[in-house]
Image (cartoon, rainbow, N blue to C red):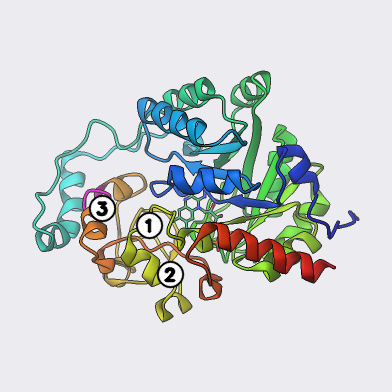
Amino acid sequence: MSSPSPRLSTAVTRLLNIELPIVLAPFGGLSSVELTAKVSQKGGLGSYGLYGYDADRIAVTARELSATTQQPYALNLWLPLDGSEEVHATDQEFAAYLEVLRPYFDELQLPVPSRPASYLPSFDDQMAAVFEARPAVVSFVFGIPPAQVLDRAHDLGILVIATATTVDEAIALNGAGVDAIVATGSEAGGHRVSFLRAPEDSLIGTLALVPQVVDAVSVPVVASGGIADGRGLAAALVLGAGAAQIGSAFLATRQSAAAPVYRTALTSEAARRTVFTRALSGRLARGIPNRITDDLGSSEVAPFPIQNWLTGQFRPTAAERGIGELMSLWAGQGSPLIAHADAEQLIDALILDARMLLG
Ligand SMILES: Cc1cc2nc3c(=O)[nH]c(=O)nc-3n(C[C@H](O)[C@H](O)[C@H](O)COP(=O)(O)O)c2cc1C
């Protein structure tokens, strides 16, 4: 059995060359340069989610990050499922998917969109732009990074982190040669990034998952899911993780790119109940329920990434206008613990409380 180290200097901080055992979660579509750089500047690892970004946007973002912090940061990508990202819909199918969502476009007085040439940028182009940017760390969700990606990253001196929702996934990632593994429990906000079994069959809580992953793999482990205060951070370290990857609590800070209505929801009574839903993206994700999840929760929605693209045509407008009922409000089960509106204060409190608890 591995022996957990209850100190703040851990295998993860040493591997990543960071001071504090805190990883800012990447937020696909909602990361901000300000928050990512702030967490890295404070001694944690800031991560930036590149979901949906094309190569040019990745290059611009990486330049902004590197201009804002000299400290290590991570760029995060979603791997294409089963090696192919193209899901096709016929004109007829596309029209049928759109019909279900038409009331929301009408309500926001937006035109319904036409079918795009593709629903996502090419993964290979994204990867090439990430390698060009040479971040200290690249992190992945939804699978095992291909061997040529791992080899190229290592040739360039880039560390590779990948994400497991089960012990079997962690073992598979360890075997593939990643440098560290995020073990993410089912409390986590956002998508359930399972890749060996259906996400519904991969629902293990952080408390049970982390020590099992620590025992099963030979690389450092980052705990994620439901961690929002110093007690959670201390618990993650005692379970044998070398850091905590924290999402919802950072999303609620003023440095995040979340719309004010979203930040308010995260710290309101509404966050006491989160649900799993496919309604917004076509993939299972945890968030605060709203009119969309209620309306579409039990009906057939378009497959990912089509549903995500379709709702992505009106969600930003809803966010701008403060209409939380028509947005994705991803949130973890620890959201009611959120107590800080500033990222620096959150980090200070996490470290102070964890230090006190760990003695
Ligand atoms: C709005 C939102 C977007 C997310 N997007 C991503 C993403 O693009 N890539 C990723 O690796 N994780 C993503 N996550 C998951 C986080 O990395 C992390 O595992 C999760 O937030 C941890 O749970 P917590 O919210 O309870 O702290 C996202 C989470 C949220 C809340």
Which sits earlier in the primary sequence, circle 1 or circle 2?
1
Q: Residues within 10 Å of mark 3 (few under 14, many from 20)?
A: some
Percent coordinates x, y for residue 63 in the rendering: 45, 28
Which quadrant of the structure image shows residue 203?
Answer: bottom right
The three-letter amino acid code for the residue at tag 1 is Ala
Is label 3 within 8 A of ligand 1 (CB to nearest ligand atom)?
A: no
Is 60 placed above or below 9 here?
above
Disc 3 versus disc 1: nearer the observer:
1
Which sits earlier in the primary sequence, circle 3 or circle 1?
1
Is label 1 within 8 A of ligand 1 (CB to nearest ligand atom)?
A: yes
Do callouts 1 and 2 mark residues in contact (Cβ within 8 Å)? Answer: yes
Residue at the location (80% across, 63% down)?
238
Instruction: Please provide the residue range marked out in magenta.
Output: 310-316
In the rendered structure, find residue 266 and report the number of the disc placed on it: 2
Residue at the location (37% across, 72% down)?
289
Element type where label 3 sits in the image: helix
Element type where label 1 sits in the image: loop
Query: How far apart are the alpha carbons under marks 2 and 3?
Result: 18 Å
Element type where label 2 sits in the image: helix
Is 312 a magenta residue?
yes
